[in-house]
Image (cartoon, rainbow, N blue to C red):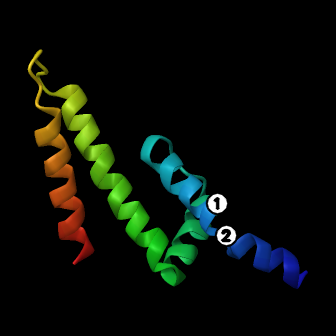
Amino acid sequence: MKNKIMHFLFLSCLKATELIEKKLHFKLTLKEKIQLELHKMMCDACSMYEEQSEIIEDGIQKHLHGTPSENTDTEKLKEQIKIRLQEHQH
């Protein structure tokens, strides 16, 4: 019984990052939400991964839904994403 509870509550970092990516595009189940939140409470690396994934996804979505031209400056977009990631690390 105790092992079932532990298995339910605690995720590996691999599973947590899978849920973080899933959360960007789909709705998580209540179980997944609870597991992910509990994991992030104990794991700074996965919390940072989630923040960085959201920043990157936001940049991609803005790029895709903006008004692209043939001369889209991808280097400028990369630099903006790097700056936002660095801001969130501090």
Q: Taking 36 as reference, is 78 left or right? A: left
**Image height of 32 relative to 61, above or below:** below
Q: Which residue is mark 1?
A: 15
Structural crowding at the residue carrying mark 1, measured as other residues with C-alpha within 10 Å and reported as few (<14), some (14–19) or many (≥20):
some
Q: Which residue is mark 2?
A: 11
Q: Position of residue 25 (x, y in %)?
A: 45, 40
Structural crowding at the residue carrying mark 2, measured as other residues with C-alpha within 10 Å and reported as few (<14), some (14–19) or many (≥20):
some
Q: Taking 77 as reference, is 42 left or right? A: right
Amino acid type indicated by mark 2: Leu
- Give the residue displayed 48% in from the left and 69% down from the top: 46
Question: Between residues 76 and 9, which one lies in front from this camera angle?
Answer: 76
Element type at mark 2 = loop
Residue extending farthest to the right is 1
Q: Position of residue 21 (x, y in %)?
A: 49, 49
**Image height of 65 relative to 35, above or below:** above
- Give the residue displayed 17% in from the left and 68% down from the top: 87
Q: Taking 11 as reference, is 48 left or right? A: left
